[in-house]
Amino acid sequence: CSFSTLLSHDPLSVSVGFSIIGGLITCKLVPEFKESFIKAKLTGKDLAKDDKEPPIPECMGVICATVYLVCMFFFIPFPFMEWFSGKGKISQSEEFHAPTFPHHKLGEFLAAMLSLQSMTFLGFADDIFDIRWRHKLFLPAIASIPILMVYYVNFGVTHIVVPIPLRFIFGRIIDLGFLYYVYMSMMAIFCTNSINILAGINGVEIGQSLVIACSIAINDFLFLNDADPAVEAHLFSLYFILPFIGVSFGLIIYNWYPSEVFVGDTYCYFAGMTFAVVGILSHFSKTVLLFFIPQIFNFIYSCPQLFRLVDCPRHRLPRFNPSENKLEYSRVKIQKPLKKPASFVLDLFELLRLVKVDKGETSIEVNNFTLMNLLLLKIGPLHERTLAILVVVIQILASCLSFYIRYHLVHFFYEV
Ligand code: UD1
Ligand code: MG
């Protein structure tokens, strides 16, 4: 798309402006609120640093999300500006044929805001009360109800086009009906929690989210051509993603190694929900999920611990070795005799060379099943900053692969 096409979409320029302003405000507010967070005991210990380091302010994601929401509130009128400026108004003679104000678009926008606001609220509650895993897993499904409702009213499309290789079983189109709504709420659960479990070292939560957000934005820009029927949907996505990129940049300045603040679950939930909202309401949830390849791997790899087939300690982040100032893979001790599912998983993962098992007399020790521990197992101990850069680089490479799949390999699966 040409530069002039970009400029002709006026609300987009305003959105870019709000993103920059949002970034600058976040950048200014975070240090100002540090003391207040410490006073309110919203702090956490940096587990990959010396024991003597004082606790640092946690759940600063709430500042970033609040600035985002305020920017979005101010932005609401802009996509509808032509209706206020007279261009959208119509003469009496035209009244019966002229288009009416797009209430459905406004509804979509407001529902998306409501979902994001609820997610931020529930994420903040989780940071304060440390909600148990089996409960907090479902918070995003609750927060996604407003967008599912608006999806039902505005689109209601619940059929999917089956990939070519599977058509001999299912046919060309399947109507998932109610299951489609289950799929969309599962997507919200996955996007939020998968970011939250690829966490624990400085800067990595925002680092991965920024790469995913930029990938979504690049994908949107590829569609910004007046001739494309999906232009409206991709503009909607950009209005939500650009300010997210702005505020995340404002926060990562303080969260990158060595962190002055932690982002908390509030940020992970807020980020994941932003991606789920644009994926669902702009109809490209599969493309969004493609940008989650590292998170999908980390989730599948984590499953035995998440579903308690193998013991799961409260923290699975890598272990800090103060003498070398490096991170090593962390391990979990499992008492013998092993239950059948646990020994099956360990044998399978050992076969795939995904774990290192140390067998003792009464117990065995194995690395925690996370992507970061696996990297440390394969490469050896790394400095915290190097590991964070490595995770971000992997995320970028995965995005390149996703674009390749989306725009080249897609021909094997769909006729586009
Ligand atoms: C998830 C992970 C957990 C991981 C934790 C780290 C699962 C099932 N849960 O739990 O294994 O240890 O995230 O975020 O995979 N922290 C640091 N450095 C950082 C960021 C966080 O030391 O850069 C520590 C701090 O002590 C902070 C705490 O992690 O207080 C935050 O953990 P929290 O987000 O509450 O953990 P969960 O999301 O429940
Ligand atoms: Mg967390």
Image (cartoon, helix red, strand yellow):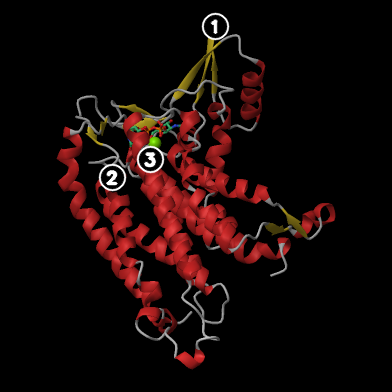
Ligand 1 within 8 A of label 2's CB? yes
**Upstream in sequence: badge 1 or badge 3:** 3
Mark 3 → mark 2, Cα distance in angstroms: 18 Å
The label on residue 255 is 2
In this orientation, which residue lies closer to the viewer: 59 or 164? 59
Question: Which of the two discs, 2 and 1, sits closer to the camera?
Answer: 2
Q: Is residue 185 above or below residue 1?
A: above
Q: Is residue 89 above or below residue 203?
A: below
Instruction: For mark 2, give the secondary structure.
Output: helix
Choose between 341 and 154: the one closer to the eye: 154
Labels 2 and 1 touching (C-beta < 8 A) = no
Q: Nearer the viewer, residue 384 or 379?
A: 384
| Image location of residue 103, percent across then percent down | 47, 69
Q: Which residue is mark 3?
A: 123
Looking at this view, name the residue that lies furthest to the right.
Answer: 168
Q: Name the residue type under label 2.
A: Asn
